[in-house]
Structures are given as structure tokens and as C-alpha cells.
Amino acid sequence: MAVNERKTIDLEQGWEIMQKGIMKLKNILEGLPETGISSEEYMMLYTTIYNMCTQKPPRDYSQQLYDKYRESFEEYIMSTVLPSLREKHDEFMLRELVKRWVNHKVMVRWLSRFFYYLDRYFIARRSLPPLNEVGLTCFRDLVYQDLKVKVSNAVISLIDQGREGKQIDRALLKNTLDIFLEIGMGKMDYYENDFEAALLKDSAAYYSRKASGWISEDSCPDFMLKAEECLKREKDRVSHYLHSSSEPKLLEKVQHELWSVYASQLFGKGHSGYHALLTDHKVENLSRMVRVFSKVPIFLDPLTNILKQRVTDEGTALVKQAEDAAGSKKVFMRKMIELHAKYVVYVNERFQNHVIFHKALREAFEAFCNEGVGGSSIAELLATFCDNILRKGSSEKLSDEAIEETLEKVVKLLAYISDKDLFAEFYRKKLAGRLLFDKSANDDHERSMLMKLKQQCGGQFTSKMEGMVTDLMLAKENQTSFEEYLSNNPNANPGIDLTVMVLNTGFWPSYKSFDLNVPAEMVKCIKVFREFYQRKTKHRNLKWIYSLGTCNIIGNFEPKSMDLIVTTYQASALLLFNSSDRLSYSEIMTQLNLTDSDVVRLLHSLSCAKYKILNKEPNTKNIAPTDHFEFNSKFTDKMRRIKIPLPPVDEKKKVIEDVDKDRTYAIDASIVRIMKSRKVLGHQQLVMECVEQLRHMFKPDFKAIKKRIEDLITRDYLERDKDNPNLFRYLA
């Protein structure tokens, strides 16, 4: 059987075949009349390379063909491509370059197919650059390196024309810059070094020229408007034809030249700088300035410092106004809330809700919200403001929606107050007054406020207040049961309408309680209620708080009988005159068993105030221990029913004392918790952890913490280390 031997192909013979195919490809690329490469022609060219590479040495021409592959590109570039590019300039050169680059990639693709067998075996075995890389490298070394400076300059020139508002071919720029990217074959070096660096330098110079003219001619808002528009256009530029990696670098250059260089001048422009805009509340211009400068982190600090100082100045001015002007405390909290609401809107809507502006706002409000105002703390004033809103007959005539909105703002303002526990105690005292004396305007608003406080400060903050509300509901149910008891037991009825509120001591503020010598009529009432209550429970002790009681009594005066609404103290004093025509100060004090201060208050309210139910001798405006009193039978008033108020006791001192006492317990509990967990701890770290635990309610004083540590040592909760007095151990 005969075997057909393959005919050997010489290098010159084979290369002549290949040159015909390559020449046909060049003619097609140059647009000369030429038919396309058919599949038969392609197979012939591929087979020729295959045969020349698979012949036995020395007729294996793989290396020679690899070299001629590269030479084919070099010859075409030197004879055709470069001359056509060198004779053109600017935009025409760029168009020719893009065309030649597209043609070159087509040529690389076709020749790589013709010589594909080299890629599969010869190149792989020798670890040589693949055919595609060799083709692109030829263009890079011969065309790109020769023209890169001219190309870069032409591109930047077109970009500058675009900046000046002229119409430019963005697709041409995109295609040209893609060459810088593709020529790097996966690396950004050529794009960054040969184009981007020059663009950044040119952009800096361009915007430096622009800004120097604007700063002298334009107001701050106008400058900002132009600067922001420039920034927007540069972003568009990146999206249309620059690589995305250029955006931060380009914007940084623009920002530096437009804002960083002129920031101090912009801030200080007399009638249009940041200070002026903030003062005049030019909201849109302010927003633009913040939007612009927020892109330059180094200039956020000056912006926030100006905002912080502005807010602090306005707040301090309000505080000073309240201290100087009589009665201005009534409107002080309203103005404070409005101030906060105004700047919260600024920060949220106009200052991009940026965290650094929130921080500046918080620090500004903390600076003056923790100062005293005419002897009162902001915590007290805030509680009083809430009381005025939630109380019946409030001077604040607001709709339900406005009340809810105002309460929301109050709670937000509370966040800046260090002594939240002081606010809680004042608020609890006011809430107790509204609940006990039926002065609350709307139960829904009361519950809503407690919910807001709970969300802001936690469940522990409102637990006692919520307990008070629940307690009052139970007290009303208890009163209903008492009334049913009286209706079912007619013999037990004391003959006087009696309403008793049984409250849990743990929830309510502490009140002064004296063993008042109540009149016989009241003694019978107390006895009846105690018998009723002991039927329900025998394990609870009733403690009567007469200072909170009220009575409706009838005064039989000569002109007419009148209903008098008085306190239990006042009623007890007046009923003494049913059995005596004239009583001395000391006799009244002895029979009532009250302190001097309480006797002075109630006698003043009955003999020296608007309604003189008692005549005092001598007839002066002050109560003295030597005074004598008689029932004023000739008293009259146009009303049939009058309420005789008892001068209020200033309970501020007691509230502060109660808060200080609670703080002592809180510091003790915190120290014990920390030491129980840590076992051994240094003094400084113990103090810091204690402050951190308690800061959500109040700011503990370091001296107070030290004092509590010493007390806990004496009570054997802690002990000092024998070798290191600044080290403490927990005693289990």
C-alpha cells in the first residue's frame, strides 16, 4: 500500500503565498477595489502556515514566520499609516488615528487567524508574546509613541473648547481616549501618564484663570452658582468620554482651584459670604455653598464652626434676653424651640443632612441649653413649658396637631440637656398636679408625650410617670367601688360627699405629710373609708396627704350664703370658727397641729388676700404670731361660688434635693455594677465607666463619684488594694 508524502514548501515559496493574502487584506483596509477573503482563501493561507510549521527541521520555519508576522505590521505602518497621520493635525489627525486604530485591530484579527497555528504550539512552547499582543505592540511602539504628545494636546484642546461652550465631537474624544486605554492592554499606565496627567495640569490652569476673574467680579452666591455648574459639567465630561477613574482626580483639581484657593475670601465676602448668608437666611445660596464645600472635607470644619458659632450666638442672646427682660421666660422656651426647629430644617434639607453639621448643631445647643436662665435651669423651664401646653386653660391656644408637633420638638430639644433626670422630676411633679387636680386638657396628649419621652430616653425614664397614669385609673375604679359600698351600707354613709384617691407611693412625687387635727366631720369620713378599704386589703397602710386635698364648704355670711372651694388646710382652719368667735395665731397653730410656715400661708390666704373670709387684728398685710382672727360675717362677693387659692409653695428646692438624692443612689448602683463585673479596677477607669453609664440621665460630678466610692468602701462593698491605693477590689 503506497503512502502519499506531503510536498515540502520552501520559506520563499510559502511566504510569497502569504504576502498575496496580506496584500489583499491591506487593499481592503485602504478601501481599494478588492473582493473579500473567501473561506477557500482563508483555508489555503492557514494550511500554508500549518505546513511550513510542521515540516521536519531544518525546514520548520516557525521562528521565521513569527518574525515575518511582526515585520508585516511594521512595513504597513511605516509605509502607509504613519505618513497618513503625520500630514494631518488637530481634530483631523484624531479622526485619522481612530480610523487607523480600527483598521489595525482588524488587520491583527485576520493575521492572527492566518498564523493561528503559531499561537497554538510554537508560541506556547517558547513562551513568546502571543500574536495579538505582537500586533498591538507594533502600533504602540511605532504610532502611539511617535504621536502621543500631539494626540494628548489635541484632545485637551477640544476639551477646553467644550468648556468654553463650543460644540465638540464627544464620540471622537471617547474613541481617541479608548486608544490610550486599549494600548495598555489591561494597564492604566499609558492613559494616566500620557494623557490624564496633562489633562489635570491643564484643568488646574483653566479653572485658576476662571476663578481669579469670578472672585473679583461676582458675589459669593454667583461664584458658587458658576462653581457648581462647572463641577456638574466636569462630571458629565467623565461620563461621556473620560475613564471613570479620572473623576475623583479631576474634581479634586477643580475644587481646589475654585474653592480651596478662595475659601477664606468666599467665607468673608461682606454682604454675600457664609456669615452674611446665614444671618440673612438666604437658604438656597446657603445650600449651594454647603453642597459645594462638602466635596472638600478640609473646608467642612470652617463651615461647621461658623454654623456652630451662629447658633450659639443666637441661643445665648435668647438666654440673655430672658434674664434681662421681665416676664420673657414665658416666651423664652417657645423661641428656643423655634430656633432649634429652624436650624434642624437647615441641616436636614439645606446642608445635605451631613453628620458633621448635626454634630455642630448638637454642640451649639448643648452649650447654652445647660446654662441657667434667671435662676432656673432649662430643664425646669422645659417642664413648665410642657405643663402650660398640656394644662386646661393654657395660654398656648393650639390645635391638636400643633400640640403634637410642639411636643415632638420639645423632646428633640431635651436631647441636648445634660440633666435629664432634673427635667424628669420637674415634669413628674407637674404631671402629678395635672392628674390629681383634673387639670389635664387631653389624656391622649399626655400619653403621647410619655411615649415620645420613652422613645427618646428609654423605658426607665418614664416608668414612674406611666405608673402615675395607670394608678389614677385604678384610683377612679376604687372610688366607684367606694360609692357602691356607701349605697349598699346606708348606715356607714358619713353624710358628706367624699372622694378619695388611693395612690401608690412608689410612682408619685413625695409630699409633706403632717398629722393634721382634722375636724370631727372629716374624722368620720376617714374612718368610713378606712373600714371600706380594709375589706379589700389588710396589708396596705393608708397615709393621708392632707396638703393635696380640697373641700367645698358653705359660708353663712350676713349678706348671703356662699360656696367656698378651699384646701383641706383652709377648711380645717375655717371650721374652727364654728365653735370660737375669736382665735389667736398660736391657738390656731396648736389646734391644727401645723408648722409655722403652713399656718402663715393658710391664714394669709384667708385674711390678707383677695377674699377676706377672716378679719385680722391688727389689720396689716403680713401674718405675725401675735395676730388674732375673727370670722368676717359681713364678707360678700358678686359670685355665689368662689375658689380661695392657697399661695403655692416653691418646690424647686425640694425637687433639686430629691434629684440629688436619687443621683447618689444611681452613682452607688453604677459603681457596684461595674465592680461586680470587673472585680478589680483602677480609680480613673472606674470613674470614666461610671460617667459613661450615667451620662444618658445626668452628668455626674467627679468629686461626687469619689465621695460615693469612699462611702462604699466604709460599707464594705469595695476595698483598696494594699499596695496601690488607686486600685479597688469588689467584695462579694
Image (cartoon, grey):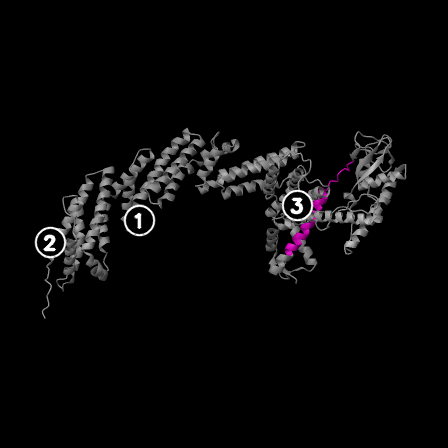
Query: What type is the residue that disc 2 sits on?
Result: Glu
The one nearer the camera, 579 or 378, is 579
- Indicate which disc, 2 or 3, sits on the residue closer to the N terminus: 2
Does residue 214 appear to the left or right of 460 in the view shown?
Answer: left
Q: Is 538 located above or below residue 579 in the figure?
A: below
Instruction: Find the distance from the CA under tag 2 to the CA under tag 1.
Output: 39 Å
Marker disc for residue 424: 3
Q: Is 537 located above or below residue 396 in the figure?
A: below
607 falls in the magenta region: no
The one nearer the camera, 54 or 445, is 445
* Circle 3: element type: helix
Query: What type is the residue that disc 3 sits on?
Result: Ala
670 falls in the magenta region: yes
Magenta region's main secondary structure? helix
Image quarter in which the C terminus is found = bottom right
Marker disc for residue 189: 1
Instruction: Find the distance from the CA under tag 1 to the CA under tag 3.
Output: 65 Å
Does residue 286 appear to the left or right of 556 in the view shown?
Answer: left
Marker disc for residue 16: 2
**Which image quadrant for residue 89?**
top left
